[in-house]
């Protein structure tokens, strides 16, 4: 028995009836949930802090996030990547998440958004 072919963003027909088309993961949705993750020591989310370096979304729904921390000795080194992964995993259409902590280039204050600078009084 052969598999039923599917077209991108279209459902398929099976003996049990039509299937729903796959949900495309949108970068805006991923960024929105990353903005819900806050460094516990700083009242600014990890996206506005400039800790997110890259978001890659595969056609299969796999999302890869490259992020850094403010310092290698950051007390939240274990929890922030896990919180980011959990947040992204909740986005509709996401099938898997990989969060990689990178140190190059090193984070510095120039990576913060204007909103983050205002919130922290760092002009």
Image (spheres, grey):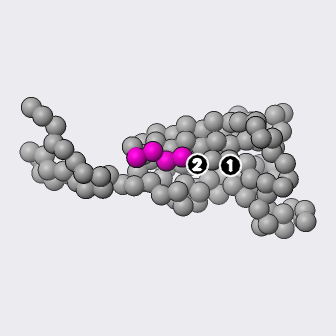
Q: Quadrant of the N terminus?
A: top left
Q: Quadrant of the C terminus?
A: bottom right
Residue 63 point in image, percent of width and height: 51, 44
Q: Is residue 104 above or below residue 12?
A: above
Query: At x 79% / y 57%, what residue is drawn?
Result: 112
Q: Residues within 10 Å of mark 1 (few under 14, many from 20)?
A: many
Q: Can the viewer see residue 47? A: yes
Specify the quadrant of the image occupied by residue 25.
bottom left
123 on left or right of 88: right
52 on left or right of 24: right
Residue 59 point in image, percent of width and height: 40, 46
Query: At x 74% / y 53%, what residue is drawn?
Result: 50
What is the chief secondary structure element of the magenta stretch?
Answer: strand
Mark 1 sits on what residue?
A: 52
Residue 87 among those drawn in magenta: no
Total residue callouts: 2
Residue 12 point in image, percent of width and height: 19, 50
Mark 1–mark 2 CB contact (< 8 Å)? yes
Q: Is residue 68 above or below residue 123?
A: above
Specify the quadrant of the image occupied by residue 118.
bottom right
Along the line of sight, the residue nearer the viewer: 45 or 50: 50
Query: At x 60% / y 38%, what residue is drawn?
Result: 99
Say which mark, if any, is on residue 61: none
Residue 65 point in image, percent of width and height: 59, 43
Q: Can the viewer see residue 38? A: no
Name the secondary structure under disc 2.
strand
Query: At x 51% / y 40%, what residue is drawn?
Result: 97
Residues rendered magenta in the picture:
55-59
Q: For the residues marked 1 and 2, what is the alpha-carbon distance in whole angstroms?
A: 8 Å
Say which mark, if any, is on residue 55: 2
Name the secondary structure under disc 1.
strand
């Amino acid at each position: 028995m052969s598999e039923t072919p599917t077209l991108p963003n279209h459902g398929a027909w099976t003996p049990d009836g039509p299937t729903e088309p796959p949900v495309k993961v949108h970068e805006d949705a991923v960024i929105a949930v990353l903005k819900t993750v806050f460094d516990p020591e700083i009242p600014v989310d990890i996206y506005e802090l400039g800790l997110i370096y890259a978001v890659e979304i595969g056609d299969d729904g796999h999302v890869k996030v490259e992020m850094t921390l403010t310092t290698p000795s950051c007390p939240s080194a274990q929890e922030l990547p896990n919180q980011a992964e959990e947040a992204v995993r909740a986005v509709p259409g996401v099938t898997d998440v990989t969060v990689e902590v990178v140190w190059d280039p090193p984070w510095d204050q120039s990576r913060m958004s204007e909103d983050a600078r205002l919130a922290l009084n760092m002009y």
